[in-house]
Image (cartoon, grey):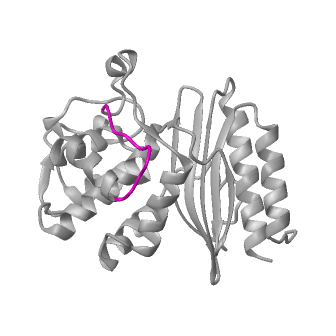
Amino acid sequence: MKKIHFDELKENVYTEASKCRGRVGLIIEAEDKRIEINSEGKFSSASLIKVPILIECFRQADRGTLNLQQPIQIASVEKAGGAGVLQALSSDLKLKVMDVMTLMIIVSDNLATNLLIDLIGMDQINQGMRELNLQHTELNRKMMDFTALKNGLDNYTTASDMLTCLKEIGQNRILTKESARKARSIMENQQFQNKLSDQIDLDAFKIANKTGELFGNEHDCAIIEYENKSVYAAVLIDQLKVPKDGRQTLASIGQLISQYLIA
C-alpha cells in the first residue's frame, strides 16, 4: 500500500470530495491536524443520530437513571421497517437495554432505536446532545417515521458534531472511562463496512464506526486505528442521485486515511 503524509492526505481528500456527485461535509482529525470541508453544514442525519443516542444511554447509566440490564419487551413499540432484525422476531421477546443499544449500532436496528427513544425520552436525548455541545444535531422524529418527515420533521447533524461524538467515545470527557470503552466496543462490532472501511484491511486496522443512509444520503463516521496512530473521521454526503457515487467517495477517503496511518 502506498504511504502518504498529512499534506498529501489533505490534498487527495479535497480532490475526492470535489469529484463527488453530491454535497459533501467532512472533518478528519489526525493528532492536532484537521481537514474540513463544509464541516458545519447541516445534513439529514439518517442513522448517524444513533451515535448520540448511544452516548445518552451510557450517560444516563453513569448517572444511575438507566439500568442497562433492564429488560424491554419489543412489542412495546410499533414495527419500524428498514434496517434491523427485531421486527422479524417474536413480539414476546424481551432484551436487556444493553443488547438493544448494541443492535441499534451494529445492525442499525430501527425498532431498537425507537425502543430506546421511548425509554429515555426524545427531550432528554436532545438535552444530552446540548450538554455534549453538539451545535446542530437534533432528534425530531423516530426512525422510519415518514409521516413526520412529510410534515417537515427530520433529524439533523453535521460532520463537526459527529466528530464530537467520536471524540467523546474515544476520549470520554462526559462519560466514565468504562462507559466510553463499552460504547467503543459496540461500534467496533459494526456489521456495515461498505463505506469508509470498504477498502481497508480490517485484520490490520481497528475501526469503530456507524454508517447512515436515506434518500440520497450516504454517511459514515469512524475512529480508525493502526498500531499507535488514530484518525477521527466524519464524512456526510447528500443530494446524491446514485447512492453508489457516495459510497465510492467514502471508500476512497477511507483508503486515503489508511495510507496516511501506515506512513
- In the rendering, at what x and y percent does residue 150 appear? 39, 15
In the figure, is residue 216 to the left or right of 111?
A: right
Q: Residue furthest bottom?
A: 228
- In the rendering, at what x and y percent does residue 20 appear? 76, 37
- In the rendering, at what x and y percent does residue 129 appear? 33, 52
Q: Is residue 9 above or below residue 103?
A: below
- Asked whether the viewer can see residue 107, the reply is yes
Q: Which residue is at a point 32% across and 21% down the rendered structure image? A: 148
In the figure, is residue 96 to the left or right of 86?
A: left
Specify start and end residues of the magenta stretch as a single range.
132-141
Quarter residue 36 falls in: bottom right
In the picture, the quarter occupied by the C terminus is: bottom right
- In the rendering, at what x and y percent does residue 78 appear? 21, 29
Total marks placed: 0
Q: Main secondary structure of the magenta part?
A: loop
Q: Is residue 75 above or below residue 241?
A: below
Q: Is residue 247 magenta?
A: no
In the figure, is residue 26 to the left or right of 192?
A: right
Quarter residue 63 falls in: bottom left
Q: Which residue is at a point 18% across and 49% down the rendered structure image? A: 120
- Asked whether the viewer can see residue 103, the reply is no
Q: Which residue is at a point 85% across and 72% down the rendered structure image? A: 3
Q: Is residue 189 above or below residue 198?
A: below
Q: Is residue 137 magenta?
A: yes
In the picture, the quarter occupied by the N terminus is: bottom right
